[in-house]
Amino acid sequence: MIRRHRRTAAVAALVTAMVAGCSSGTSTDQPAVTGNQDAVDAALQAGGTITYWSWTPSAKEQVEAFQKEFPKVKVNLVNAGTGNDHYTKLQNAIKAGSGAPDVAQIEYQALPQFALTDSLVNLDQYGFGAFEKDYTASTWASVKVGNGLYGLPQDSGPMALFYNKEVFDKYAIAVPKTWDEYIAAAKKLRAADPGKYITSDIGNAGFTTSMIWQAGGKPFSTDGRNVKINLADPAAKKWTAMWDQMIQGKLLSTIKDWSDDWYRAMGDGTIASQVAGAWFPGILKESVPGGAGKWAVAPMPTYDGKPVTAENGGSTQSVLKQSTNQALAAAFVRWLNNGNGVKIFLDSDGFPATKADLASPAFIDEAVPYFGGQKINQVLTQAANDVAKGWSYLPYQLYANSIYNDTVGKSYLNSAPLDTGLADWQKALIDYGNQQGFTVSAG
């Protein structure tokens, strides 16, 4: 379950250090490797000690269960922070050449940056490529960088519409199936009660990229150290044309996401819906207890009513090259995300990336009390099947996110066209990438 917190400007310094430290031949340039799991199995039998950095709520229980199942193995669990704090500490240890964990939690969007610095172990050498069939296509693609496999998917975040049914029913607002209907619903709600908004958005890099993804965009492509960026393709413009109406029509709440005020607004009906990843139910249950029985889930609106969605959030666990027991670390990753650790993660409200769990009747047909007994996983598992294919992140996505507010964010602030902000973002990203040794061009 990954919360989409805003990145701070400090990420820029972190990413500069990461990218500047790249060798000329990175893991993304190397040929694919293959192997088998014998070394992993042997490492489990031999035992040993590894360190694991993670922020997930299920980590402590997973570690305890793993050690009970494999008593010869000791796992030291460390919460080094979330977001920028976690990545800064991780990169500092990598740069120092010591102090890094054996296994680290890394978000899909951040994975390319650590892979391209040759900091992670390619798990193909242990035969983990055989697990591809076990995962959804979008999450498997998220742990592949170039020819390498740098983790096994932990969770997924297919997007859906989470809405306050009590508010929608009170104002006779039909659940929108298209974005045109969503805009109409936003206008109807504002007209009926000027104190309420259909959603809140003051500019969020993760939301923007996911919305472009859903529209069919593929703005970032990487081939080795050659990068192309196109934030002005037809799909991006499809989204901006639609979302500009929300911004310029003053249809969006400007309450900052993830703030105390935002959680209160979610609970009291001031904010009536949120388009987010499948991890969002856990956020509502944890932080908006007053919304119990009021909220429901529906498919994400689309442009033509035909189902298609995108991923929003998600992470993996990677083995660090600095590890002195890489095979044992790989065994732990296998157990976490392709073994008995998966159930523990799901029990903590995580949303699976594994096809078997997504197809499990017990999961699909669970009536969730917070959502008034709705079987929300029927909607969310279908969303996982409807994710548009072909997406990839920049090899310096964390930096991209860190300067988003200085570019696209100004369009929100000034109620200006989003295309202008995206053009500024693209120029800044091309300039930065070229300064860091990539060959970046408008694509």
Image (spheres, rainbow, N blue to C red):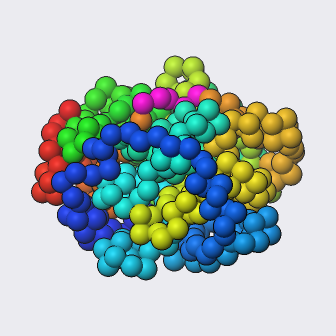
| Residue 53 within the magenta-colored segment of the rendering | no
Quarter assignment of residue 21: bottom left
Quarter assignment of residue 147: top left
Q: Quadrant of the N terminus?
A: bottom right
Residue at 56 percent of width and 44 percent of height: 36
Residue 200 visible in the displayed image: no
Residue 398, above or below 382: below
Residue 66, above or below 252: below
Residue at 30 percent of width and 44 percent of height: 30
Q: Is residue 67 left or right of residue 310?
A: right
Q: Is residue 149 left or right of residue 306?
A: left
Prevailing SS of the magenta stretch: loop
The percent position of residue 23, horizontal first and vertical second, equals 21, 58
Residue at 33 percent of width and 40 percent of height: 31
The percent position of residue 279, horizontal first and vertical second, equals 64, 52
The percent position of residue 310, horizontal first and vertical second, equals 51, 37
| Residue 389 within the magenta-colored segment of the rendering | yes
Residue at 74 percent of width and 48 percent of height: 295
Residue 437 visible in the displayed image: yes
First to last magenta residue range: 386-390
Which residue occupies the foreground of this view, 436 or 27? 27
Which residue occupies the foreground of this view, 267 or 428? 428
Q: Quadrant of the C terminus?
A: top left
Q: Is residue 442 left or right of residue 59?
A: left
Quarter assignment of residue 230: top left
Q: Is residue 268 left or right of residue 440?
A: right
The percent position of residue 273, horizontal first and vertical second, equals 62, 47
